[in-house]
Image (cartoon, grey):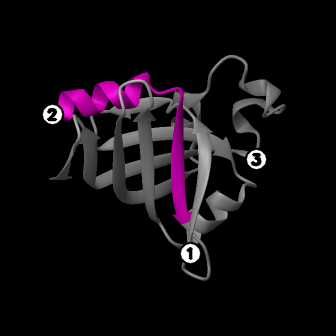
Amino acid sequence: MLDRIEKLITSCPTAVLCSVDERGYPCAKAMFAPRRVEGVKEIWFSTNTSSQSVGRYRTNDKASVYFYDAATFQGVMLRGRMEVCFDAASREALWQEGDEMYYPQGVSDPDYCVLRFVAENARYYADFQSVDIEL
C-alpha cells in the first residue's frame, strides 16, 4: 500500500498544504508538486519565505499535506511536522532552472526557502475505503 501512496504523491501536479493559524484554525494552500519525495514519510517543497504559511509553520510546526487524483478517486492525507529550512544545502538541493522567475536573486534569495515535511501518519482513500496508517 505504501508503494501505491508514493506513486500517487509523485504523480500529482499539486498538493494542498495545511498549517495552523494563531487562533488554532487550519489554513489550506495549494502548492506545486513536491520537489523531492523520500518514500511516503519525507516530502520537500520550495516556497517564498514571506508567505503566511511559512510564518505559521515557524510558530506551529503541525501540518498536513493532501494529494489526490480525481480521475481514479483516490487520495491521501498525511499528518506530521513541517520544518522551514534556510540552509544552503537544502536550498541548493531543491533549486531548479526557472526558479529565478520567482527568486530573482537566485538560490541565495532571502525570499526563497524550503519546506521539509515529515509524516507521522496517513489516511489513504482508494477503492471506496479508507485506511489509517502509522508511519
Q: Amino acid at mark 2?
A: Met
Q: Residue, x 53% and y 26% (percent of image)?
A: 13
**Magenta residues, start to end:** 1-19
Image label count:
3
Helix, strand or loop at label 1? It is loop
Judging depth in this view, the residue of 106 and 24 nearest the camera is 24
Q: Amino acid at mark 1?
A: Tyr
Q: Which residue is disc 3 drawn over?
A: 110
Cα gap from disc 3 to disc 2, whole angstroms: 39 Å
Judging depth in this view, the residue of 59 and 77 nearest the camera is 77
Q: Amino acid at mark 3?
A: Pro
Judging depth in this view, the residue of 91 and 68 nearest the camera is 68
Q: Which residue is disc 1 drawn over?
A: 25
In magenta stretch: residue 108: no
Q: Nearer the viewer, mark 3 or mark 2?
A: 2
Count residues near mark 3 (Cα–Cα under 10 Å), then give few for <14, some for 14-19, many for 20+.
few
In magenta stretch: residue 3: yes
Cα gap from disc 3 to disc 1, whole angstroms: 28 Å
Q: Is residue 19 above or below residue 89?
A: below
Q: Are marks 3 and 2 in contact (CB under 8 Å)?
A: no
| Residue 79 percent across, percent down from the top left | 35, 57
